[in-house]
Image (cartoon, helix red, strand yellow):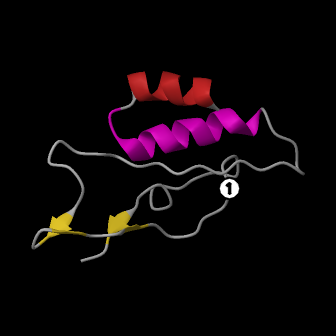
Amino acid sequence: MLGSFREAANVEDALADVARAIDRAVVGDISIEDFVTAVFVEFRPEGLPKVGGKIIPVVGKAIQPLGYGLTALDAVCTANS
């Protein structure tokens, strides 16, 4: 999976596209009994999301493990405000 990440990170512009590329790569490497989980986090130049000087927790929704076909909405996290 690390090799897939390195390859995708050099080719894809958006984090969601990196996640989808890794998902596609994992499909050929796992059997029906296996699963792969990952946390994808993008740090922007301005740093962690903050409101009034306080860091906001980043929350993502629970989705299937990698290798089961991420959709565009599955590959996106949102920050609570």
Q: Nearer the viewer, residue 22 or 42?
A: 42
How many residues crowd around disc 1 within 10 Å: few (fewer than 14), some, or many (20 or more)?
A: some
Question: Does the magenta segment cover residue 17?
Answer: yes
Residue 2 horizontal/vertical position (percent):
60, 29
Which quadrant of the figure contains the N terminus?
Answer: top right
Local secondary structure at mark 1: loop
Quarter of the rendering containing residue 45: top left
User: Magenta residues?
Assistant: 13-28
Query: What residue sits 53% from the left and 30% below the top?
Result: 5
Q: Is residue 60 above or below residue 24?
A: below
Q: Which residue is drawn at 50% across and 60% down?
A: 74
Q: Main secondary structure of the magenta part?
A: helix
Q: Is residue 19 above or below residue 60?
A: above
Task: Answer with left or right where residue 19 lies relative to residue 11.
Answer: right
Please name the residue that numbered disc 1 is placed on.
65
Q: Residue at x 45, y 61 (%)?
A: 73
Q: Where is residue 80 in the image (x, y as percent from the top left)?
A: 30, 75
- Magenta-span inclusion, residue 7: no
Which residue type does callout 1 highlight?
Pro
Q: Is residue 69 above or below residue 50?
A: above
Q: Is 29 on the left-hand or right-hand side of 46?
A: right
The residue nearer to you, when weighing 44 against 23, is: 44
Q: Where is residue 65 in the image (x, y as percent from the top left)?
A: 68, 55
